[in-house]
Image (cartoon, rainbow, N blue to C red):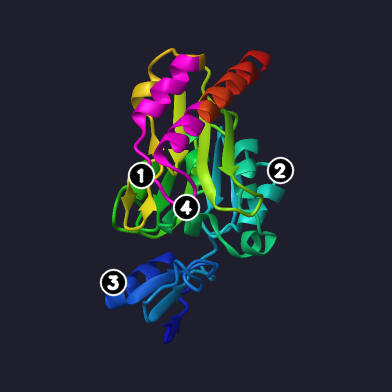
Amino acid sequence: MIEQYLTPDTPAQALEFKQLHGNDAIWFAGGSKINAAPTKTDKTIAISLGRLNLSQIEQQGDSLHIGAMCHIQQLIDHELVPVALKQSAAFIYSRHIRNQATLGGEIAARQPEALLIPSLLALKATLKLANGQEMDVEDYINNDERALIATVIIPDSSLTCIGYNIARSAAGLAIVTAAVSIDKQGNKVIALDGVSPLYQGAARPVRLRDVETQDLKGELLEQAVADAIYPEADIRGGVEYKRYIAGVVITDLMAECQHMVEEA
């Protein structure tokens, strides 16, 4: 339970507070995760990010810079945000949650449904941390340390990208969340969530790098995707079903993405 609430005025002061209080402290962004099950925190000190001026959305050349404190609904409403990221933001069904949750919080929270991360991976997003370090989203989510995110950078906001979420109902648990992209040189990215072995209670989003390098279509692509993932059975579905639906979704998305590239 949160017993102390700290309000730093700068990222540097926020980092000082975290260093001082260590594992007893947690970052407090929108609060949608640390105040609600199943991600409710057991930490006693909250370090608020509300005064750090990290909610801007700015185009800088070809790249789009999105502050980590940008709320999810802002992504949907903002004209500069790529369509694929708007789509994945809308996978969060509740507008109340979208008005509260932040982009940085969605990346940093290790939760069973990482609805935005496949699209961020497909968009080749990178993170600028409060300590000045830069790293890929993929490296960040595979690192047990949860450093403070300052900015999410999409290097090419015009990249052709599309995503999809499979759930049993509009507000139901996500079974598989997928995203693909194709750049001007024909390089592909295939990203999925919900299809890897559980780690600390959640499946980590993954990129299928081996499949990306193969020029596969139709049933061959479906099978390659199914063979490349290792889902676990749970209330959402069995292993074979998840492999099957992931292959079908990626194949459909890749065909649509290729069509979009040719039409551009």
Instruction: Please name whichever residue, 183 or 205, is drawn nearer the observer in this view of the structure.
Output: 205
Q: Is residue 210 left or right of residue 149?
A: left
Mark 2 or 1, nearer chain start: 2
Name the residue tied to disc 1: 135
> Are the residues flagged by discs 4 and 2 in contact, CB closer than 8 Å?
no
Q: Which of the two labelled residues, at mark 4 and mark 1, occupies the earlier sequence position? A: 1
CA gap, disc 3 and disc 1: 21 Å
Secondary structure beneath dot 3 equals helix
Q: For the residue marked with disc 2, what is the amino acid?
A: Glu
Q: Quick one: label 4 or label 2, which is nearer the N terminus?
A: 2
> What range is drawn magenta here?
219-247
Determine contact: label 3, label 2, CB under 8 Å.
no
Residue 43: quarter of image:
bottom left
Query: Which x, y percent locates residue 252?
Result: 58, 24
Disc 2 target residue: 79
Residue 168 in picture, x, y percent from top left = 60, 47
Residue 235: which disc? Answer: 4
SS of the residue under disc 4: loop
Measure the C-alpha gap from mark 4 to mark 1: 34 Å
Magenta stretch contains residue 245: yes
For the stretch drawn in magenta, the main secondary structure is helix
Residue at position x 55%, y 49% from top? 66
Q: Which residue is mark 3?
A: 19
User: Circle 4: is it few (<14), some (14-19), or many (20+) Cα within 10 Å?
Assistant: few
Q: Quadrant of residue 249?
A: top right
Can residue 48 be seen here? The reply is yes
Q: Amino acid at mark 3?
A: Gln
